[in-house]
């Protein structure tokens, strides 16, 4: 499926990195990013988002390259999406729809599928249009009188009922998770959650520490379902390590809300291992994006250790960094090669034994110490 990627630079910074990310997202969804159309604006056009002139340029590019789908690196309003599709005669999706589609493809567990469907339906509810005017004839001869409500109203009602049913099902799954967490808390088991930007290497690290065999791939959102395993920390005893869904910039709010039951595994953790792709040129921005989502779900108060992963790609030696109080701030490792994993296990053991207080916001520390990573 040939895709045209569209990105508009509004002067906020990070435009190139965001566009590269859109290309990865498109490939992850099964599309071929064939052409890229970019432009600059001070603000979105109310009708077409990109303006009439840029829309005509896009229409020519779509026709010349036989494009099957147009993917915007932005969130479109329902009206903007409809206007663009009428003009371009091609299916148009925005960044939110693209991410939802990837989540729908990757969800494997019952809970994951329920959460994704709920997010999709909540997004769809704002985009129902009058597509069934032939069914809306409320008067006329025999056989032409309408039912008591239009097809659009029926669809909205059925969609609302489905959303309500999914919400009830998720509440039940949430209660089950809460019961499991309470049982774990009674045993006073040290709980650690892996968090980080998508494709930072969380699942690879999870497998390396637990031998769990969880699915890991070099693609965005390879993991959607939270997996928990015991990990042995030597004389510090056992800990429960949980692998969670990766974050991304402009993560759709519907997904954050629908995945709240899964993300609560993070909010109940004693420690967060914030996994960072050390080889990424946008690692600092990615750290910021993860911290934004952590704050949104109420997990910004939980102590963090930054795990600088993929150091083998930038020839950085394994190490453990502490602050002036001796508290562990960052561990540099490669989960793929196994270099530095012993240091990370030791760090986890030290935290488990002492349950020390680690600075939850180590972003400023790592920004100041980031020069040696280049």
Image (tube, grey):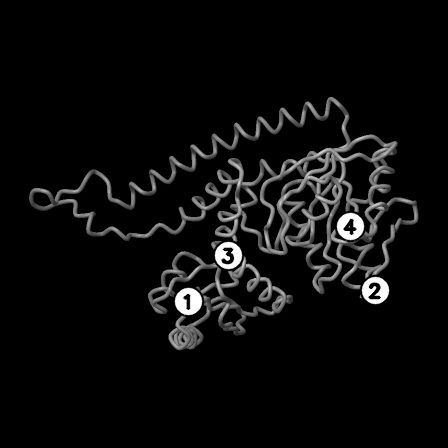
Distance between the alpha carbons at the discs numbered 3 and 1: 24 Å
Residue at left offset 17%, top offset 42%: 146
Lateral position of residue 171 relative to residue 164, left or right: right
Task: Tell me the crowding category of disc 3: few under 14, some 14 to 19, or many 20 or more residues within 10 angstroms, Cα based.
Answer: some
Distance between the alpha carbons at the discs numbered 3 and 4: 28 Å
Closer to the observer: label 3 or label 1? 3
- Which of the pair 256/117 is nearer the observer? 117
- Which of the pair 204/132 is nearer the observer? 204
Name the N-terminal-most of marks 3 and 1. 3
Q: In the rendered view, would you say 42 is above or below 262?
A: below
Q: Which residue is mark 3?
A: 29
Name the N-terminal-most of marks 3 and 4. 3
* Residue 212 position by quadrant: top right
Distance between the alpha carbons at the discs numbered 2 and 3: 35 Å
Q: Position of residue 28 (x, y in %)?
A: 54, 57
* Residue 250 position by quadrant: bottom right
What secondary structure is marked by label 2? helix
Tell me if label 4 and label 1 are in contact, CB under 8 Å: no
Circle on res. 48:
1
Distance between the alpha carbons at the discs numbered 2 and 4: 16 Å
Lateral position of residue 94 relative to residue 213, left or right: left
Residue at left offset 80%, top offset 34%: 232
**Picture quarter with the C terminus:** bottom right
Lateral position of residue 249 relative to residue 317, left or right: left
**Picture quarter with the N terminus:** bottom left
Circle on res. 116:
none
Q: Which residue is mark 4?
A: 307
Residue at left offset 57%, top offset 30%: 174
Circle on res. 371:
2
Name the N-terminal-most of marks 4 and 1. 1
- Which of the pair 175/348 is nearer the observer? 348
Name the N-terminal-most of marks 2 and 4. 4
């Amino acid at each position: 499926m040939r895709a045209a990627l569209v990105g508009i630079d509004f002067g906020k910074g990070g435009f190139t990195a965001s566009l590269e990310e859109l290309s990865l997202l498109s490939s992850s969804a099964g599309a071929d990013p064939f052409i890229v159309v970019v432009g600059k604006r001070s603000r979105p056009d109310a009708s077409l988002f990109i303006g009439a002139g840029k829309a005509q340029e896009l229409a020519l590019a779509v026709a010349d390259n036989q494009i099957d789908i147009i993917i915007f690196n932005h969130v479109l309003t329902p009206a903007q999406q409809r206007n663009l599709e009428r003009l371009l005669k091609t299916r148009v999706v925005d960044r939110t729809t693209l991410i939802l589609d990837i989540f729908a493809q990757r969800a494997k567990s019952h809970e994951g599928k329920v959460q994704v469907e709920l997010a999709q339906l909540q997004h769809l509810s704002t985009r129902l249009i009058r597509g069934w005017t032939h069914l809306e004839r409320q008067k006329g001869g025999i056989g032409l009188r309408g039912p008591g409500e239009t097809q659009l109203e029926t669809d909205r009602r059925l969609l609302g009922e489905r959303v309500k049913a999914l919400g009830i099902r998720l509440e039940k799954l949430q209660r089950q998770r809460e019961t499991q967490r309470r049982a774990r808390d009674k045993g006073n088991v040290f709980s650690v959650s892996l968090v980080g930007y998508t494709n930072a290497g969380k699942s690879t690290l999870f497998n390396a520490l637990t031998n769990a065999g969880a699915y890991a791939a070099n693609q965005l959102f390879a993991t959607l379902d939270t997996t928990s395993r015991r990990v042995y920390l030597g004389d510090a005893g056992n800990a429960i390590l949980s692998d969670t869904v990766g974050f991304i910039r402009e993560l759709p709010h519907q997904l954050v809300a629908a995945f709240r039951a899964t993300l609560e595994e993070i909010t109940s953790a004693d420690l967060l291992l914030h996994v960072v792709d050390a080889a990424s040129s946008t690692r600092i921005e990615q750290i910021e994006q993860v911290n934004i989502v952590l704050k949104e779900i109420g997990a910004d108060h939980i102590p963090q250790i930054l795990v600088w992963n993929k150091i083998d790609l930038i020839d950085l030696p394994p190490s453990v960094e502490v602050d002036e109080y001796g508290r562990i701030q960052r561990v540099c490792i490669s989960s793929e090669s196994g270099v530095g994993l012993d240091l990370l296990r030791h760090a986890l053991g030290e935290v488990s034994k002492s349950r020390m207080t680690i600075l939850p916001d180590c972003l400023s520390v790592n920004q100041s110490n980031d020069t040696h990573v280049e």
